[in-house]
Image (cartoon, rainbow, N blue to C red):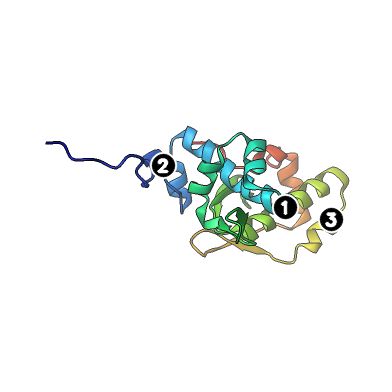
Amino acid sequence: MRRNRKRGSKRLRKDAAIPRTSADYFAMSERAQDRWNLVPQVVSKMKADEISLQKASREFGIAPRTVARLGRDALRKNKSGRYEAKPIDTLLRVVMLPKMDGGLREVGTANSGEASIVGRYWAAVQKYLETGDSSALRKIRRKTIKDENGRRVRLIKDVAELERLGSAGVLSFETIYAKAA
């Protein structure tokens, strides 16, 4: 006698796990990392443009169902049953930050607020390197961000150091995002 089994388990497949730390992220397959990287982008797009999950997902070429499953900590259903993005989310974003010794390091940000600071920081660095105007760097008041473990990570704001790193080719737009392992 056969037992009836439920189809469509609610458990996530191993390669579709939600990374909580940068170690979890880098343990994922490259395909899973690529898919994961789209989830915070969709959520950010929903917030920035005040658009639906379906529209934002379509723009990035990922299924809304996948975003809802993997990004469930960043979404909530409103009274009409539609998903909307929370103001601050706790989705892991692995970004690159310059180090004093001239290299770059991968840092997992704890939430969207920290990731926004990193984005503004990189925009200010690029502006300084292109124009020599350091006013945007001065507007970033924080000198550190928190990583996914709550540790403080220093943002290099010294223009002489940034000039040196820029001349060495360490700082470019492509270096903002973590590379796949």
Return the disc, 2 or 1, that comes first in the chain's sequence: 2
Disc 3: CA contacts within 10 A as few (<14), some (14-19) or many (>=20): some
Q: Residue at x 69, y 58 (%)?
A: 117
The answer to which of marks 3 and 2 sits earlier in the sequence is 2
Q: Which residue is mark 3?
A: 134
Residue 16 image label: none
Between marks 3 and 2 in the image, the one whose residue lies nearer the viewer: 2
Few, some or many C-alpha atoms within 10 Å of disc 2 (few <14, some 14-19, many ≥20)?
A: some
Residue 155 visible in the displayed image? yes
The secondary structure type at the circle numbered 3 is: loop
Q: Quadrant of residue 118?
A: bottom right
Location of residue 147 with respect to 164 vertically, above or below: below
Q: Estimate the x, y position of residue 16 in percent, counting from the top left.
A: 43, 41
Residue 102 seen in this snapshot: no
Task: Write the residue at 62% across / 55% down.
Answer: 84
> Looking at the picture, which amino acid does disc 2 mark?
Ala
**What residue does disc 2 label?**
27
Give the amino acid at mark 3: Ser
Q: Which mark, by number, is residue 50? A: 1
Give the alpha-carbon distance from disc 3 to disc 2, as whole Å.
38 Å
